[in-house]
């Protein structure tokens, strides 16, 4: 008997949430939860790994770096409860992919249509810098999601670490070598699992508070990348 896609995603989600493979990150996600910021005093932190979330039939998969210590690590949902998420979900809402422009907490009513949001690493790392061995340990979860999201025709890397991890998973152009990360970079991928022939990989600067504050990434730039992703969408 075949298992439904939502059930397979739920099984992978359970595996992610139970993971304790990286001792440094297990210690960090727990330590952060024990010292909430004043703004979050009284909140019960999630303090576990985060699975991706969104539409199982997504045509667009967005891949970030890792949960923020007081964002996703607090709320239990990717890009939820921090400024990066505010910027990202506002853009997804403008593009018609998110039901609302804000993302405060799990259960806030946000739904994604045609999009799935995930990350290269599932536990909040100190200084937002996972170690190479932590990135390697977490890679199978991203590979598993990409393999299950069979309708995805565009993968959007948010930042150079997400791009590097996708390349390490096998994302490669049909001809030649993959170039270095650049905002607006676009590759048509060959069929190396978990990718599929004809899938496109796009790149954007990460919507981090610093990138947005310094103007490295503007709302118009992110809107432009999402519009290009929509152009590349295949039925
Ligand atoms: S970063 Fe990934 S592999 Fe490491 S403990 Fe968290 S979920 Fe597990």
Image: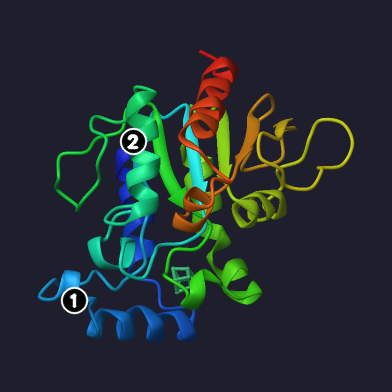
Q: Residue at x 47, y 74 (%)?
A: 125
Tell me the SS state at disc 2: helix
| Mark 1: few/some/many CA within 10 Å (<14, 14-19, 20+) | few
Give the residue at the far top of this rendering.
235
Q: Nearer the viewer, residue 52 or 105?
A: 105
Q: Is residue 103 left or right of residue 97?
A: left
How has the structure been colored for display?
A: rainbow
Question: Residue 192, image x and y in percent?
Answer: 71, 40
Pick whichever of labels 1 and 2 is earlier in the sequence.
1
- Classify 29 as above or below 184: below
Q: Residue at x 54, y 43 (%)?
A: 217
In this rendering, position of residue 175 left or right of residue 110: right
Q: Image quadrant for the N terminus?
A: top left
Q: For disc 1, does the CB lie below 8 Å from ligand 1?
A: no
| Callout count | 2
**Residue 228 bears which disc, if any?**
none
Please indicate, yes or no, whether residue 70 appears anywhere in the rendered image: yes
Mark yes or no: residue 56 visible: no
x and y, in percent, of residue 207 in the image:
48, 48
- Label 1, label 2: how many angstroms apart (C-alpha)? 25 Å
Residue behind mark 1: 38
Decide: is 185 above or below 224.
Answer: below
Q: Position of residue 61 (x, y in %)?
A: 49, 37
Hey, which residue is sitting farthest right in the picture? 176
The residue under the point 66% across, 42% down is: 193
Q: Picture quarter containing residue 37? A: bottom left
Please, what secondary structure does the residue beneath circle 1 have? helix
The CB of the residue at mark 2 lies under 8 Å from ligand 1: no
Residue 90 bears which disc, if any? Answer: 2
How many C-alpha atoms fall within 10 Å of the one at disc 2: few (<14), some, or many (≥20)? many
Q: Nearer the viewer, residue 204 or 151?
A: 204
């Amino acid at each position: 008997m075949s298992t439904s896609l939502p059930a397979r995603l739920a099984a992978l989600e359970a595996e992610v949430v139970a993971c304790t493979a990286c001792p440094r990150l297990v210690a960090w996600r727990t330590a952060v939860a024990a010292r909430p910021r004043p703004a979050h005093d009284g909140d019960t932190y999630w303090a576990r790994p985060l699975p991706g979330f969104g539409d199982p039939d997504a045509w667009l998969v967005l891949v970030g770096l890792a949960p923020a210590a007081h964002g996703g690590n607090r709320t239990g949902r990717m890009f939820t409860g921090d400024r990066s998420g505010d910027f990202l979900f506002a853009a997804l809402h403008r593009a018609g992919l998110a039901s609302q422009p804000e993302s405060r907490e799990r259960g806030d009513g946000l739904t994604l249509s045609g999009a799935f949001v995930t990350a290269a690493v599932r536990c909040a790392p100190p200084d937002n810098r996972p170690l190479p061995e932590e990135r390697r340990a977490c890679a199978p979860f991203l590979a598993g999601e990409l393999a299950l999201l069979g309708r995805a025709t565009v993968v959007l890397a948010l930042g150079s670490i997400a791009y590097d991890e996708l390349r390490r998973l096998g994302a490669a152009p049909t001809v030649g070598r993959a170039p270095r990360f650049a905002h607006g970079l676009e590759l048509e991928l060959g069929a190396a699992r978990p990718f599929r022939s004809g899938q496109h990989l796009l790149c954007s600067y990460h919507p981090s508070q610093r990138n947005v504050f310094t103007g490295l990434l503007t709302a118009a730039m992110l809107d432009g990348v999402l519009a290009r992703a929509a152009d590349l969408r295949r039925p």
